[in-house]
Image: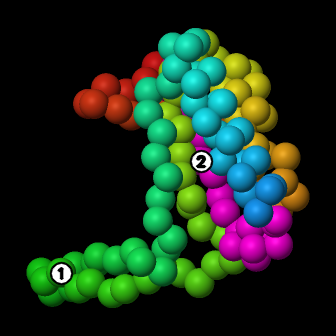
Amino acid sequence: MQFLISMHINPAVLDALTDEEKAAIGGGHGTFIEALKKSGELITTQALIDPSQAAVVSVRNGQPVVTDGPFLESKEYLGGFYLIDCENKERAIELAAQIPDAAIEGLGVEVRQVMFADGQLEA
């Protein structure tokens, strides 16, 4: 079963962390990635740039309209994700609990099963 573990970032929470705490988060992700690789459960992981550098694309009257920045004003944004392949939802939750962000008040880690991938609906 495939699961997306997404990390939701609150910039105010991150800004309040010390440099040592921020470094510990980065190191924790490195350790987590290596463990997932070793277990064979990691498909991919990506970190996303700050939403202020994003572009929002919509089509109006058949023409693309592009605006800068995040789609909605929000105190949280998607900061990155892990796409994993593991036995079941319980294992996905167990893995998500190992992500350093999960231990920081004000940051969120969400687990969602992949329903559709590469033209195949998951059973």
Q: Position of residue 63 (x, y in %)?
A: 13, 83
Q: Which residue is mark 1?
A: 64
Task: Please state which of residues 35 and 68 is positioned toward the viewer in this rendering.
Answer: 35
Let me know if residue 47 appears in the view.
yes
Left or right: where does residue 123 sit relative to residue 107?
left
Q: Residue at x 37, y 86 (%)?
A: 68
Instruction: Give residue 105's quadrant in the image.
Output: bottom right
Which callout, 1 or 2, points at the residue further toward the start of the chain? 2
The amino acid sitting under disc 1 is Pro
Q: Locate residue 120 relative to residue 18 in the image: left or right.
A: left
Q: Secondary structure at mark 1?
A: strand
One can see residue 41 in this view = no
| Magenta residue span | 1-18
Q: Nearer the viewer, mark 1 or mark 2?
A: 2
What x and y, as percent, mark residue 66? 27, 84
Q: Secondary structure at mark 2?
A: strand
Foreground: 5 or 23? 23
Q: Is residue 41 left or right of residue 11?
A: left
Image point (62%, 21%), residue name:
35
Q: Residue furthest front?
A: 20
Residue with the mark numbered 2: 6
Residue 120: give x, y in percent of width and height. Answer: 31, 26
Asked if the magenta segment contains residue 122, the reply would be no
- For the residue carrying disc 2, how many other residues have a C-alpha within 10 Å: few (<14), some (14-19), or many (20+)? many
